[in-house]
Image: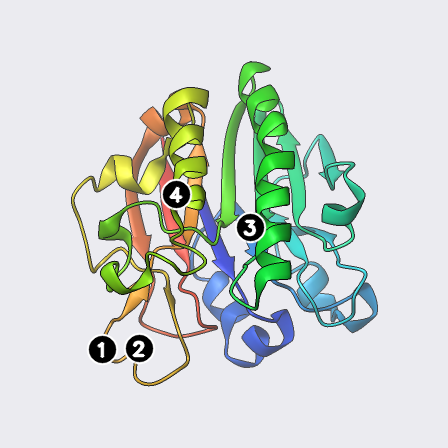
Amino acid sequence: MRIITVNLNGIRSAANKGVFAWLQKQDVDVICMQELKAQAADMTAEMLAPAGYFGYFHYAEKKGYSGVGIYCRAKPDKVIEGLGIADIDNEGRYIEAQFGNLSVVSLYLPSGSSGEERQAFKFSVLHCIMPHLEQIIASGREVVLCGDINIAHQEIDLKNYKGNKKNSGFLPEERAWLGDLFSRVGWVDVYRKLHPETTDECYTWWSNRGAAYAKNVGWRLDYQISTPEMAKKAFQSTIYKDERFSDHAPLIIDYQ
């Protein structure tokens, strides 16, 4: 089973850059998308359901903002839009597709880089979502949670870690939250399991400022995080950089 997660930074923009032609060549079972920046009325037929796939979306109320989606080759048994937490759901940040005992989730955690108010909201989201992540792993379901987490967990997960210790995305509190998710709650960072020591090949996001991409001054912000049994089934991962569809690169992981 192949799962791809990608922050599109606007589905319409990514479509113009060829993301759908690329997806058709990937032999992928589930595609998790974040930052659609679109509402239902903005979506073309191809965006709603590419050839061979079912499409499901959780749009933000604010136009041209946030939003998540899932494409899947097999029709899910159930789709859950949102977490039932109004201020998170208004921004379209969670969608879950269930296939038997397997859930695949597309999650878009907020960035706090625009200022103190958004950083406070980010901390609120982290606090509110933790009980759900504890519950779903305790339920006995197998889960792959995909998305733009907007946190670089360790120093090896970004180029300039020394200069970013006080910046959103690498704050001690954020890193501690993610560490707690892995160590105490029991979720597994699948890419890190497959590549425990890689450094500059792991990045999935580059700032549009300066020449960050050309110089590979990146961050690992996009994850596939799974229950332990699913993590054992992962055997191969790729971060696709041959084409650029957004400021993020697709993360591809194959599971047995």
- The residue that disc 3 covers is 32
Between the residue at mark 1 and the residue at mark 2, the CA separation in whole angstroms equals 5 Å
**Residue 48 seen in this snapshot:** yes
Q: Residues within 10 Å of mark 4 (few under 14, many from 20)?
A: some
Q: Are marks 1 and 2 in contact (CB under 8 Å)?
A: yes
Image position of 12 (left or right of 225): right
Q: Residues within 10 Å of mark 3 (few under 14, many from 20)?
A: many
Amino acid identity at mark 1: Lys
Q: Residues within 10 Å of mark 2 (few under 14, many from 20)?
A: some
The image shows residue 181 at horizontal and vertical percentages of 45, 30
Disc 2 marks a residue whose amino acid type is: Ala
Q: Which residue is mark 1?
A: 215
Q: Nearer the viewer, mark 4 or mark 1?
A: 4
**In front: mark 3 or mark 4?**
4
What kind of residue is marked 4? Arg
In the rendering, at what x and y percent does residue 167 appear?
A: 41, 61
Label number found at residue 175? 4
State the separation of the CA atoms marked 3 and 4.
23 Å
Q: Secondary structure at mark 2?
A: loop
**Rendered residue at 57%/40% (across/down):** 126
